[in-house]
Image (spheres, grey):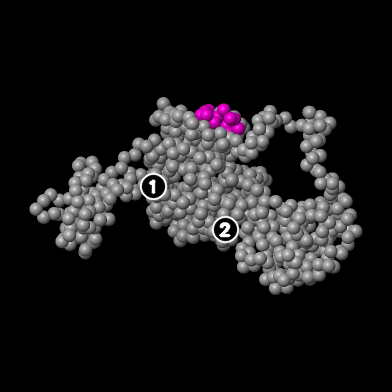
């Protein structure tokens, strides 16, 4: 190959989402005959760029696991503020620093740097695409750029490891060095962990769970519950747990904890629990006949077919889910990897729950499920909302419990998380998206603001400066309590919008970033949902109207509830338990023939069926060689009690001349109307 290899590895910027500043059309036009550009984006935004049109000239290497390989094959590095500059300096090869936002980024009020960037980086700094093209077009000159400065940078920032034996030195220091034992972290399972590593087993807990699940006999009365990845005892699993504890005292009900810390917490709350950090938990987990979960965290688990895994879900999503997502900007994940992981987890489920035809179709499509896996139970967590929505005494009791001023209108702020809220891989930072100080100034004497952050957030803003105006109740696991104590919901793209609608109370849908979230995650944009409030001023106007009891424009409509809340009737928990334990019965539905199906022609040799009070049995075959037409008297289908699906049929009862009427399957007839 006689082309130079240029590696572009910029850092991640938390502001303004994804921002790619190189004009690739210009690059290919001017330098495509001399260079190949490898693009290595930060893992937070890996593979957000479609480079297929530049095949062979610009190559996306963001998903390539070993960046060191990319260093070695490249002749030149383009970066900005990324730490890759320190690694690449080991090669003594030229670097270009494309710092198009230099003044903003180096300002300590924004991001800031530890070193004097301009005086330190070992290569030319360019701020525009044109300047970058000019530098890359003369690589001979670039390679001669201030070699003394590059050597100084190398000596100052790569002092150790220059001989290439860093790994060896670390191992020898740990095994043979003079480190005081008191300064080392003690790992009581070090030997065990070393064995797993030697055997190249990356997930020993899951590996053992898979093994023993196949070996041990199932305990028909053992149920495992898990909520939000083993971090809570809440949501629909908790509703099912409570009813089973009351109605099925002979069943053993255990909660799965993510680690020993959560196990200790669950025990203090009075729950029997197993920890995923304790290998002795595996035998009990392997014997469990039933699992009730609302999240995906046992990645790699392969439950045998005789285990029933009930995925309750967390509600109906406003965002596209699973395989329906067109773009993934979650930290460190490509779309293909994300979808593969989601579908692998969904393959563990025996059943999942739904509260509407819309939600059923959403889950079938997003999780690639079969129709018979999705059941029309409603969501168990919502039963209490239906039961207590008009109970003003209970509302007052809840407000006293959380020290909320009952004389004010209570607004619950429950925003969802965005992919670009990521601060590092798998960790998200919550943001208040309106001016709380201004809100307090305008409405502080009339409203009480309650905040509930999503469980997905790891870092929450400090709201203590707003004193009694804002009460952060994110630590309360039971979100239904917060719904019931509130008069109004302020939300955006949260699934909570559908749960709160069951209360028939005002919903303010504050969505100032609707376009960007819709373009990234994909959203339901349905006129049946409450009106979008796109600006802070419109939010304030809406708050003013609601306080004044002018709520008409913000109440959930009958049409919205019919579409999204069809099967939330208050019996979801009971329905879910019947489904879990296999206590459902399917019914045969019979209808008189209507004008749509009066006469049919029957395929020659079609099976004749007769009805024997509870089911069909074979009686023989039709001889329809004379192209006879038959009158249809009635139809009969077997329908699932839970998801209203047709399980068998339709069967048609047809009138036969000079003999008893017989049944035939619709699929073996032709409609002759």
Task: Please identify the quarter of the rendering in which residue 390 is found.
Answer: top left
Q: Is residue 634 visible?
A: no
Label 2 sits on a secondary structure element that is loop
Residue placed at 9% from the left, 53% from the top? Answer: 658
Quadrant including the N terminus: bottom right
Picture mark count:
2
Residue placed at 86% from the left, 54% from the top? Answer: 153
The residue to which callout 2 is attached is: 327
Residue at the bottom extreme of this rendering = 29
Over which residues does the magenta segment extend?
269-285
Work out whether residue 577 or residue 668 is closer to the camera in this orientation and state it.
Answer: 668
Residue 372 disc label? 1
Label 1 sits on a secondary structure element that is helix
Residue 597 disc label? none
Instruction: Tell me, yes or no, whether the two marked residues, 1 and 2, touch with CB atoms within 8 Å.
Output: no
Task: Please identify the quarter of the rendering in which residue 23 is found.
Answer: bottom right
Image coordinates for residue 533, horizontal then vertical, percent: 54, 59
Magenta stretch containing residue 271, yes or no?
yes
Image coordinates for residue 99, horizontal then vertical, percent: 77, 62
- Mark 2 crowdedness (10 Å alpha carbons): few <14, some 14-19, many ≥20: some
Residue placed at 34% from the left, 39% from the top? Answer: 584
């Amino acid at each position: 190959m006689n082309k130079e290899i240029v590696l572009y590895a910029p850092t991640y910027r938390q502001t303004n989402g994804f921002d790619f500043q190189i004009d690739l059309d210009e690059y290919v036009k001017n330098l495509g005959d001399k260079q190949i550009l490898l693009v290595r984006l930060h893992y937070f935004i890996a593979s957000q760029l479609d480079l297929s049109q530049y095949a062979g000239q610009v190559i996306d290497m963001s998903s390539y696991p070993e960046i060191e390989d990319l260093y070695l094959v490249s002749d030149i590095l383009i970066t900005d503020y990324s730490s890759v500059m320190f690694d690449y300096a080991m090669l003594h090869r030229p670097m270009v620093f494309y710092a198009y936002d230099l003044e903003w980024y180096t300002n300590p009020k924004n991001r800031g740097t530890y070193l004097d960037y301009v005086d330190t980086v070992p290569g030319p700094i360019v701020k525009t695409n044109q300047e970058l093209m000019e530098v890359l077009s003369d690589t001979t000159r670039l390679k001669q750029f201030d070699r003394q400065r590059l050597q100084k940078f190398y000596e100052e920032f790569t002092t150790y490891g220059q001989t290439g034996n860093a790994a060896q030195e670390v191992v020898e220091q740990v095994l043979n060095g003079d480190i005081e034992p008191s300064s080392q972290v003690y790992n009581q399972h070090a030997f065990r962990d070393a064995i797993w590593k030697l055997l190249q087993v990356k997930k020993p807990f899951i590996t053992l769970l898979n093994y023993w699940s196949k070996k041990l006999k199932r305990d028909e009365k053992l149920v495992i519950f898990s909520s939000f990845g083993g971090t809570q005892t809440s949501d629909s699993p908790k509703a099912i747990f409570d009813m089973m504890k009351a109605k099925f005292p002979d069943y053993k009900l255990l909660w799965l904890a993510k680690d020993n810390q959560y196990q200790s917490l669950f025990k203090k709350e009075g729950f029997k629990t197993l920890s995923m950090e304790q290998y002795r938990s595996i035998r009990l987990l392997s014997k469990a006949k039933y699992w009730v979960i609302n999240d995906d965290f046992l990645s790699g688990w392969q439950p045998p077919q005789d285990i029933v895994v009930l995925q309750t879900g967390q509600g109906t999503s406003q965002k596209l889910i699973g395989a329906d997502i067109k773009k993934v900007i979650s930290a460190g994940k490509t779309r293909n990897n994300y979808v593969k992981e989601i579908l692998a987890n969904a393959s563990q489920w025996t059943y999942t729950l739904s509260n509407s035809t819309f939600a059923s179709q959403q889950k079938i499509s997003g999780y690639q499920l079969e129709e018979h896996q999705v059941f029309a139970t409603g969501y168990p967590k919502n039963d209490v909302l239906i039961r207590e929505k008009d109970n003003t005494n209970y509302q007052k009791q809840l407000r006293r419990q959380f020290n909320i001023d009952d004389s004010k209108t209570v607004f619950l702020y429950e925003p969802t998380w965005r992919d670009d809220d990521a601060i590092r891989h798998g960790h998200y930072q919550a943001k208040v998206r309106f001016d709380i100080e201004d809100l307090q100034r305008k409405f502080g004497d009339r409203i009480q603001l309650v905040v509930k952050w999503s469980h997905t957030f790891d870092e929450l803003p400090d709201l203590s400066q707003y004193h009694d105006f804002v009460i952060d109740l994110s630590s309360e696991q039971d979100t239904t309590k917060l719904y019931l104590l509130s008069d109004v919901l302020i939300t955006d793209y949260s699934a909570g919008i559908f749960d709160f609608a069951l209360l028939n109370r005002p919903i303010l849908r504050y969505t100032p970033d609707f376009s960007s979230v819709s373009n990234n995650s994909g959203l339901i944009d349905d006129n049946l949902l409450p009106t979008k409030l796109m600006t802070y001023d419109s939010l304030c106007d809406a708050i003013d109207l609601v306080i004044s009891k002018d709520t008409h424009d913000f109440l959930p409509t009958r049409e919205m509830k019919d579409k999204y809340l069809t099967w939330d009737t208050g019996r979801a928990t009971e329905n879910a338990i019947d489904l879990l334990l296999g206590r459902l019965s399917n019914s045969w539905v019979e209808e008189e023939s209507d004008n749509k199906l009066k006469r049919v022609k029957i395929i020659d040799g079609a099976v004749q069926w007769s009805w024997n009070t509870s089911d069909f049995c074979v009686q023989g075959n039709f001889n329809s060689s004379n192209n006879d037409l038959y009158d249809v008297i009635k139809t009969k289908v077997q329908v699932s009690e839970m998801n209203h699906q047709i399980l068998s049929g339709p069967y048609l009862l047809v009138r036969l001349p000079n003999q008893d009427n017989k049944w035939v399957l619709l699929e073996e007839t032709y409609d002759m109307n």
